[in-house]
Image (tube, coloured by chain):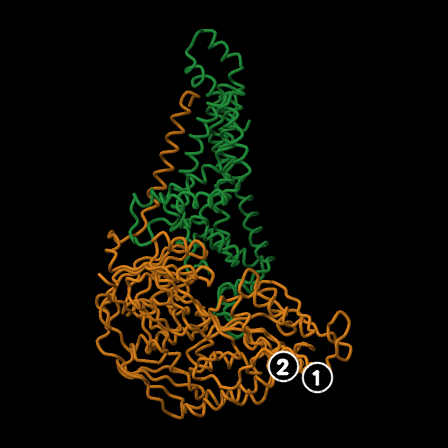
Amino acid sequence: MRARSIRGTGAVAAAASLAVAASACSAPGDGKNAGGAEDSAVVGIAYEPDTLSPLLGYGKDGNSKIFDGLLTHDADMKLKPALAAGLPKVGDDGRTYTFKLRKGVKFSDGKPFTSKDVVFTYETILDKKTNNAAKTELDAVKDVEAKGDDTVVFHLKYPYAPFAERTVLPIAPEHIAGKQDVNTGEFTTKPVGTGPYELVKWSKGEKLTFKANPGYWGGAPKVKNFTMAIIKDDDIRATRLDAGELDGAILPPNLAKKYQNDSNKKSYAAKTFDYRVVTLPTGNKVAGDIGIRRALDTGVDRKAMVDSILDGAGKEAYGPVPTDSPWFTKGTERGHDLAKAKKILDDAGWKPGMDGIREKDGVQAKFPLWYLSGDKLRQDHALAYASDAKKLGIKVEVQAGTWEVIEPRMPKDAVLAGGGSPADPDFDQYTLLKSSLAGDGFNNMAHYDNPQVDKALDKARESGDHAKRQAAYDTIQRELVKDPGYTFLTHIDHLYVVDKRFGDLTTQTEPHDHGLASGPWWNVEDWQPKQ
Amino acid sequence: MARMTGRRALFAVPVLLAVTFGVFAIAAASPFDPVKAYAGTAGLTASQENLDQLRANLGVDQPLVQRWWDWLTSAVHGDLGDSSTLRQPVADVIGERIGWSVLLAATAFLLAILVGTTLGVLAARRPGGWLDRAVTSLAYTLEAAPPFWIGLLAVWLFALKLGVLPSGGLTDTASSAVTAGQVASHLVLPAAVLAISQLPWFVLYVRQGVGDALGDDPVRGARARGLAERTVLLGHALRSGMLPVLTLIGSRVPELITGALLVETVFSWPGIAAATVSAATAVDFPLLAALTVLATAAVLLGNLLADLLYGLADPRVGFDG
């Protein structure tokens, strides 16, 4: 080739690269555009699931849109039957749970749902080879047995009262998921379930599009097309809501505020079990001291945190159970009382020393407090906590780090942690407070050790009797007043803004996780949009 | 020419081996824990036994060399392994995304070459003139501006203030179908931003090359023969002035890749960028290694292409001696 043909070569190369690009871009689409505005909804969320396979943990807390569990929660978080025909029969002193299954239910590919699918789902999750990080939650299950096509019996290793709450986890079809690699097969991104919606497309990092399942056993949803746009940045989410690209979105308090007087949009504040807490590790000479613990518990200004950090969208927390839950023990609220807190320290022998920091037996009242770097909300809580502690003469050194940095320090250093699971009080409290679980992964981060609490925790999960359980949780909450191994600070409301044309919506009590099903769209299949 | 290509391909093998081993070594030395990254929030309530089982299942309890060797041997047999972050085979991850990245990068690159050459030639015509000064100072300013910053600025101006172009994604949020029209309108901003970030180098190189060529004997001769200014400029000066640009095309490939990473992130473009970022922070070895091989191969190919083009354009330059 001579120099003369250089331009020709360039053009050929350019054309070739474009052709390659174009041919590689034939991404699958169903060829139809989204339906009219009245039967479609687009919401902005901040969180993207890692997988859509229930076998790997997707939708384990229920309400997954594509799938159904045996049971599900109503607006008040009460259990109601979904794929089961009724609530389970509990036998053998709380060791067996028997479910009758709903008849005539089909997966969205037309194949019938049977007891085999239930057994397959649970057995696969419990299989050691399945990379499901949440399988600890099914620890109580010994085995699952199918009796005919329409009955499933769970046999438990020990009596476990809240077990029915675990059966909200979605059921996968054995005829599809059973034929591929459970950890990486196509089912993890192209799921098929029995739920009100079918997945049209998951464009990772961008959005999930769903269409209504016309054959849904609960009736076809009115909102035919449902899109969840994944927008991690809060500001961009708010702007796209303003621009009309979104019909609804989750927003932090400062951004949600400006929609309060918007005539087209309605704001929703979902009550939650989502707490922020400071762990006071038993292994730390200062944080493990009962006087310090009680002084901090009385000396922190929770009200100020709710008002300033959360813009009022939340409430003061005194334990994992929020004050408005029926499980909360009235009378265990602790008011902010500096004088009382200082007196507790004086009585416990912590005397003011150099630089205003108290001392006892040559030990200075100071400990480090870690928070997850990049988490603004936790940073604000940690700084407020340190400033309150300083007024008492306790020096809390706030430091940021990733979990890799923080985890090895958990037995000695305090951590600004979060959690919350509304389905049953056992879910939070057992793992948070049981002494035998100290240092087991992220369980009992503070290495809390209180025999009274241990005993009450066991009693609370064994008994199926509500009054007995309530009494046990009352004991735990009262013990937490006497020996607060954690300083609970706030329960945080989750704020959402949604277009008014969808009418008045509801929210469920939400967990710490911002799952896909949180928010007013928890029951999008029941929405009645105005025409 | 064929010999040079062959020699380069042979040379690529040790380079790729070293690069992949480097990736495994750096990832192993990073403070990130792949098991934590895999488990996500569920890991915060998982028991230690559960986490240990995950570690074994994911194979990350193996020593570094062992992991690298396992990956390498199966990669040679065509199995790139499974991505732990995306719960998919690596081949699927790349297959789904690379087309979009290539489309974005190719569009931006073509745009940068075309606009860059035009501006460069215009600037070279009257060195020191107002156009030259404007173009040159703009190029220096853009050279200093990071692509993600230009990207955010473009989103602010065109999507938020003017509302004329979509702010991100491949298609409209509500649409589930991928149509050419949708993709084209969503491509405008990211491609323009990526092109702008590449533009300064082309402008400055062309301006310099064409400017020098205008002072050379052949051009002066052409002028003396009374050829039209247009013919002189495009037929003579540009052709010899383009030579340095050809080398530049190859050497811009790494910049183009990193620029595309940032631009894709800003515009939620579903290319391999998001996958690369998550693979790196989650210590997703198989995905990270495959993506690094791809990037390295692209750079090596870019250099080869530049040398080939240079040789073709100027027969005096041989192919690797």
Tell me the element at label 2: helix
At horizontal 36% and vertical 91% (from top left) the residue drawn is: A91
At horizontal 57% and vertical 68% (from top left) the residue drawn is: A381
Quadrant of the frame with the N terminus of chain A:
top left
Circle 2 residues within 10 Å: few <14, some 14–19, many ≥20: many
Task: Locate residue A123 relative to residue A308 in the image: left or right.
Answer: left
Identify which residue, A233 or B214, lies in the foreground.
Answer: A233
Q: Are marks 2 and 1 in contact (CB under 8 Å)?
A: yes
Quadrant of the frame with the C terminus of chain A:
bottom left
Q: Which residue is mark 1?
A: A348
At horizontal 55% and vertical 83% (from top left) the residue drawn is: A434
Task: Locate residue B164 relative to residue A254 in the image: left or right.
Answer: left
Identify which residue, B253 or A66, lies in the foreground.
Answer: A66
Residue B156, x across and y down, in percent: 44, 46
Q: Which numbered circle lies on residue A294?
A: 2
Q: Amino acid at mark 1?
A: Ala
Identify which residue, A414 or B4, lies in the foreground.
Answer: A414
Relative height, residue A95 to residue A341 (above, below): below
Q: Amino acid at mark 2?
A: Arg
Q: CA distance from mark 2 to mark 1?
A: 10 Å
Tell me the element at label 1: loop
Check the residue under mark 2 and report the chain it is in. A
Residue B144, x across and y down, in percent: 55, 38
Among the chains pictured, the one given orange colouring is A
Q: Quadrant of residue A288?
A: bottom right
Residue B92, x across and y down, in percent: 39, 54
Any part of residue A447 in sight? no
Callout 2 and callout 1 share a chain: yes
- The hue of chain B in the figure is green
